[in-house]
Image (tube, grey):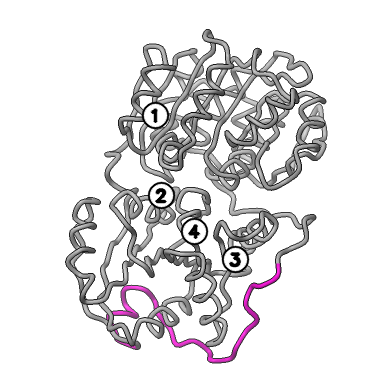
């Protein structure tokens, strides 16, 4: 098995990874790091949770090492589809950037542009940004992309799904044609292929698994419930031990479920686009730290969060199509850990749900369950809720609230900086 040193990463970076207990590269990292270090354009395909952030981020830092970034002119750029993902990419690369003397910052929506513009004016080597906010900063003259030597587009398929490709192309058009370009995507649809053909030159393509299949090992189940039993079944599943992510179709449905769970003694966090950025940051922080082990979300979280140790994903409302199923399911079984995905369906939804899971490549057949059933307990770890009401999450955290340290691992380092705040300069020597 190759080590990070074998892949060509410098000793200082390997030692920094070891301090974060990251020792053995994942397959996608072993495949793409040497090619990125060699200067090739790279198309990386693989299921979510496969370690793509470090796969492109580490060699980008090495490629930028030793250079100088002028004020407002970053030399490396990572584009991410959501605020949450951009934040987590920055966090994942934070320690490594310090180790090699690189300055990293993020620019996302939800916070004022002023602080981000001031940060860019002090000089940034690697900028992680969402397309909309980067366009705003470009229009304000707060950043220029003329010096960008390496650009990475992460989750390009999700960019296409949420309509960001026009912004992505506008940004790529403002980076030098001679620059190195990296594109990572779980799937390779027509829109993503067009992006590859237009902007990548003779790309080296690497894939670690079928883009139509989720990361293994994952168990998939369809649980058929009577409509009258569904609330009780969901409450028992949410009362289990372990980090649990529940997906609901609408924002109102999320709020309603969180309130219902609170009434029976289950404290759950809320994550959807109708909440403020401070509220979402607080909810994700509490979920990541384990302070609130249950998170109820709309599909805004299907690609936007990367949290290790989510042992169960529940489709309280069945997803609309196989892609949505795989995106939601990809929140579990990350970093090589096992996970379970459960879809709740009523009898009238059975045929549609079974057809969808078959198209998603998991082919789950429905099994009938009721509250307290042994099979429900066996498949999900369901438990009886306490019945003692708890306060639901109705008030956002103050803007100054900061996320806690996430679980150490490939998907995230131990610290991030709030967008727009000053970073300390890397020390000459640093240990733990």
109 or 292: nearer the viewer: 109
- Mark 3 or mark 1: which is in front? 1
Looking at this rendering, what residue extends furthest in the top direction? 178
- Label 1 to label 4, Cα distance in Å? 24 Å
Left or right, residue 109 beside residue 79: right
Check disc 1 and report the residue beneath it: 44
Identify the image quadrant of the N terminus: top left
- Label 3 to label 1, Cα distance in Å? 32 Å
Q: Position of residue 120 (x, y in %)?
A: 76, 27
139 or 307: nearer the viewer: 139
Q: Name the residue rendered at 52%, 26% in the picture.
A: 152
Mark 3 and mark 1 in contact? Answer it, CB < 8 Å.
no
Q: Mark 2 vs mark 1: which is more N-terminal?
A: 1
Mark 2 and mark 1 in contact? Answer it, CB < 8 Å.
no
- Which region is colored magenta? 372-395
Looking at the rendered structure, the secondary structure element under dot 2 is: loop
Few, some or many C-alpha atoms within 10 Å of disc 1 (few <14, some 14-19, many ≥20)?
many
Check disc 3 and report the residue beneath it: 290
Check disc 2 and report the residue beneath it: 336
- Mark 1 or mark 4: which is in front? 1
- Label 3 to label 4, Cα distance in Å? 10 Å
Q: Mark 1 vs mark 4: which is more N-terminal?
A: 1
Check disc 4 and report the residue beneath it: 309
């Amino acid at each position: 098995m190759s080590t990070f040193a074998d892949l060509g990463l410098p000793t200082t970076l390997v030692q920094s990874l070891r301090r974060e207990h990251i020792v053995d590269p994942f397959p996608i990292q072993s495949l793409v790091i040497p090619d990125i270090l060699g200067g090739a354009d790279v198309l990386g395909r693989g299921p979510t949770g496969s370690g793509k952030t470090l796969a492109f981020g580490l060699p980008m830092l090495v490629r930028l090492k030793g250079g100088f970034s002028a004020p407002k002119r970053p030399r490396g750029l990572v584009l991410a589809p959501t605020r949450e993902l951009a934040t987590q990419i920055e966090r994942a690369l934070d320690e490594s950037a310090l180790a090699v003397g690189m300055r990293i910052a993020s620019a996302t929506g939800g916070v004022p542009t002023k602080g981000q513009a001031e940060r860019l004016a002090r000089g940034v080597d690697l900028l992680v940004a969402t397309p909309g906010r980067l366009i705003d900063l470009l229009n304000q003259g707060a950043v220029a992309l003329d010096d960008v030597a390496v650009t990475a587009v992460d989750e390009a398929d999700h960019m296409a799904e949420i309509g960001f490709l026009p912004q992505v192309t506008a940004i790529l058009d403002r980076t030098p044609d001679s620059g190195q370009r990296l594109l990572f995507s779980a799937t390779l649809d027509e829109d993503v292929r067009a992006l590859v053909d237009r902007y990548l030159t003779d790309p080296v393509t690497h894939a670690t698994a079928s883009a139509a299949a989720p990361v293994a090992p994952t168990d998939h189940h369809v649980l058929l419930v009577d409509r009258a039993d569904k609330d009780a079944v969901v409450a028992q599943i949410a009362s289990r031990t372990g980090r649990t992510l529940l997906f609901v179709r609408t924002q109102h449905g999320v709020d309603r479920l969180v309130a219902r769970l609170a009434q029976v003694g289950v404290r759950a966090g809320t994550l959807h686009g109708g909440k403020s950025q401070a509220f979402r940051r607080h909810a994700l922080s509490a979920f990541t730290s384990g302070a609130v082990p249950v998170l109820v979300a709309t599909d805004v979280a299907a690609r936007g969060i990367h949290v290790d140790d989510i042992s169960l994903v529940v489709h309280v409302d069945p997803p609309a199509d196989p892609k949505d199923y795989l995106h939601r399911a990809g929140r579990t079984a990350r970093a090589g850990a096992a996970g379970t995905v459960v879809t709740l369906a009523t009898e009238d939804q059975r045929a549609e749900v079974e057809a969808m899971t078959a198209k998603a490549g998991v082919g789950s057949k429905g099994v009938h369950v009721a509250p307290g059933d042994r099979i429900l307990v066996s498949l999900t770890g369901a438990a009886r809720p306490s019945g003692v009401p708890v306060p639901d999450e109705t008030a956002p955290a103050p803007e100054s609230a900061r996320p806690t340290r996430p679980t150490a691992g490939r998907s995230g380092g131990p610290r991030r900086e709030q967008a727009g705040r000053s970073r300390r300069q890397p020390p000459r020597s640093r240990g733990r």
